[in-house]
Amino acid sequence: MTCDQWPMTINLQPLKMTKFLIPEDNFKTQGMRKKLLDQVREKGISDTAVLNAMMRVPRHFFLDKAFLEQAYSDHAFQIGAGQTISQPYTVAYQTSLLELNKGDKVMEIGTGSGYQCAVLLEMGTKVFTIERQKELYDKAKEFLPQIGYRPKFFYGDGYKGLPAFAPFDKVLVTCGAPFIPNDLLQQLKVGGILVIPVGAGSVQTMTKVIKKGPCDYETNELSQFRFVPMLSDKEWGG
Ligand code: SAH
């Protein structure tokens, strides 16, 4: 299979029994996923490598099994701890903006359910993912490896990034940031890309920053989205 064909076909493989009750990925769920991704494509996502990566990630694994229909509709959905799994269109949009290459070192801010992280891994990247909510961090850290996804997990503050692991080829923020944190710009390689929804209110502007030189950034403001807020230490009570 090459990555530039759509629709792709995937081989269904039996899943190991694990502590989590993992639903099956069968022809029904695969068909639902294909329909969903056709909708995402119709909404303007033409990056077949991204669509194919999303076809390989069973989104219903990331929601309670009662929410199969929701897993395959193009909407964000509650995942507990007051947070959401991003809308599939948004995941496709952000992933496309990153212009990922195989082997890229990517920092993700906001692990949440781990769904976006799985899509990044399916693009052949190495992912360093940070989550601020202990409950979500613990759950993702245990669950993702059980379905075959092995990023590096960090429980910490996304505003600070991961200086010890920098520089990164790409940085993806999956919560709404009131401003572009300087630490994240610093931790980007020259030639790297930061994708971040920026806006302090309920609406954010998707922003793509390309690092042209050590202190030279090209900033592109794109479409509007709604994200859960990127919380600072103060808002967290930390
Ligand atoms: N990528 C996730 C989307 C989760 S929503 C997914 O695919 O499911 C955004 C996440 O960002 C939430 O889990 C929230 O707890 C987290 N978050 C908010 N502020 C943060 C911060 N300062 N550092 C790290 N994570 C943060």
Image (tube, grey):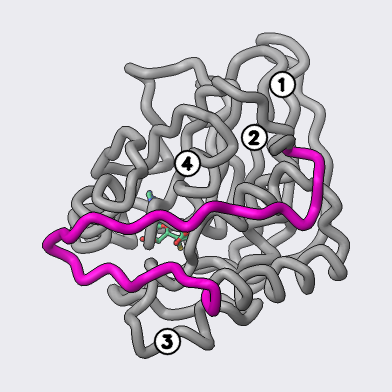
Residue beneath label 4, please? 108
> Is the residue marked 4 within 8 Å of ligand 1, measured from its CB?
yes
How far apart marks 2 and 1 lie (CA) works out to: 8 Å
Prevalent SS, magenta region: loop
Q: Which mark is residue 211?
A: 1
Q: Which mark is residue 194?
A: 2
Q: How many marks?
A: 4
Residue at disc 2, secondary structure: strand
* Disc 3 residue type (three-letter): Phe
* Disc 2 residue type (three-letter): Leu
Q: Is residue 140 left or right of residue 51?
A: left
How far apart marks 3 and 2 lie (CA) works out to: 32 Å
Residue 27 drawn in magenta = yes
Residue beneath label 3, please? 67
**Residue at 27% of width from left, 68% of height from top?**
22
Looking at the picture, tell me which residue is in the foreground, 58 or 188.
58
Q: Is residue 202 above or below residue 187?
A: below
Residue at disc 4, secondary structure: strand
**Residue at 83% of width from left, 41% of height from top?**
220
* Disc 4 residue type (three-letter): Glu
Span highlighted in magenta in the image: 3-29
Q: Earlier in the sequence, mark 4 or mark 2?
A: 4
Q: Earlier in the sequence, mark 2 or mark 1?
A: 2
Q: Earlier in the sequence, mark 4 or mark 1?
A: 4
Q: Is residue 236 left or right of residue 49?
A: left
Say which quarter of the image contains residue 197.
Answer: bottom right
Q: Which mark is residue 172?
A: none
